[in-house]
Amino acid sequence: MARKESKGFVQLEWVCPNCDGRNPGSIKTCGNCGAPQPENVKFQRAANEKVVTDEKLVQAAKAGADIHCGFCGTRNPATATTCSQCGGDLKEGKAREAGQILQAAPTPLKAVTCTNCNAENPGSANSCVQCGAPLPKTATPTPAKPAPAHAQSMGAQKTQPKKKTNWLVFGGIGALLMICCAAILMLFVLPSKSVQGTVTDVRWQTSVPVQEVQAVNYSNEPGSAPSDAYNVSCQTESQEVCEEKTIDKGNGFAEVVEECHTETQEYCSYTVDEWTTIQTYPLQGNDLNPVYENPSITSDQRLGTSTETLTVTFSTPDGEETYTPGTVSEFQQFQIGSVWTLKLNALGGVLSVE
């Protein structure tokens, strides 16, 4: 069953489009230039956000989305009925958007210089410690979405801001990958040279498995047991998975909500009767006619799929080379003493024989 729990409210901030000053979310006009916050300027999470404990701020956060006056655009609290700027009826106004899940704030710079008095301030500050003027924005918040956290680690998750793409670096990495791929092709796939080789030896090894039905035990397999299983024992394991979300309230604050749900997974132990290899019968030889063992089997047994390993040895001016034909019919072409053209890769491996 889903569970939702409020962790409290945090104050957001907004960036003045007129002067780039950063302002606390509860402030409706820019502290640097006095311009009102336009309707289309959204709130964002602050790098130094903390859960609000002041009761007045908590009540303001709970009040609902602010309203922009339909006559002058001034931002007013949700509880207001007339505009604080022009006195207009706020029934004609428009409430700010609310309910959006906000991404984490960017990592602040180590220091920010005040544009008003040139004082150096901590990167997490949004107003100058010397003159009180709003500080300019430090970065654009573009972090990835936080991953869900298990109940054992339910703390708030912070992600790093997405850095500006350095196409020069990506270009260099791409060029390096292309060089690596070309090198692999040159070393292993593309022919480097051709040599004449004389067949000096051929070898084959065959293997025939004998199988019978045996009981095979499986333990703690995820999912349901097969329909033909027996000695079935299943158990369901539950795990509470939680995710913390910061939800814009439309009034300069956001509510931190932890949403949890229970995930279940069934695990089963069981026994299944399966054809199992109980013995293999190998043969080997030095001619061009591989032979497969034909073992006697009982009524409750069967022969599995036979396999073979085929090897041809060539004598070349550069020494011995070996080649593995893909089929028996190809293998049977390599008569002792016959001469073939071997195509080799850069490492001396045989790629093909003609």
Image (cartoon, rainbow, N blue to C red):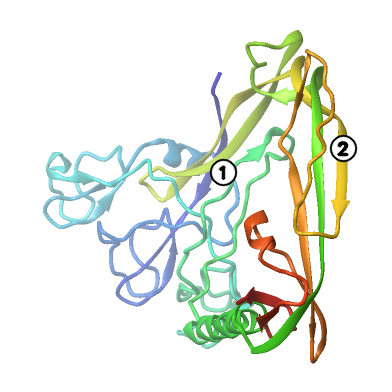
Q: Quadrant of the C terminus?
A: bottom right
Q: Which residue is mark 2?
A: 281
Q: Quadrant of the N terminus?
A: top right
Give residue 13's position: percent from left, percent from top.
45, 59
- Which residue is at the front of the view, 178 or 341? 341
Q: Is residue 240 left or right of residue 1?
A: right
Separation of marks 2 and 1 at Cα, in angstroms: 83 Å
Q: Which residue is mark 1?
A: 54
Give residue 334's position: percent from left, percent from top.
70, 68
What residue sits 33% from the left and 75% below the top? 33
**In this view of the protein, can residue 269 be seen by the observer?**
no
Give residue 300's position: percent from left, percent from top.
78, 14
What residue sits 25% from the left and 56% below the top? 39
Q: Is residue 74 left or right of residue 273?
A: left
How many neighbours does mark 1 have within 10 angstroms: few (below 14), some (14-19), or many (20 or more)? few
Q: Amino acid at mark 2?
A: Tyr
What residue sits 78% from the left and 64% below the top? 311
Which residue of the protein is positioned furthest toward the top in this rendering? 231
**In this view of the protein, can residue 117 be seen by the observer?**
yes
Residue 216 is drawn in which quadrant? top right
Q: Is residue 299 left or right of residue 340?
A: right
What residue sits 59% from the left and 67% below the top? 107
Foreground tag (2 vs 1): 2
Q: Amino acid at mark 1?
A: Asp
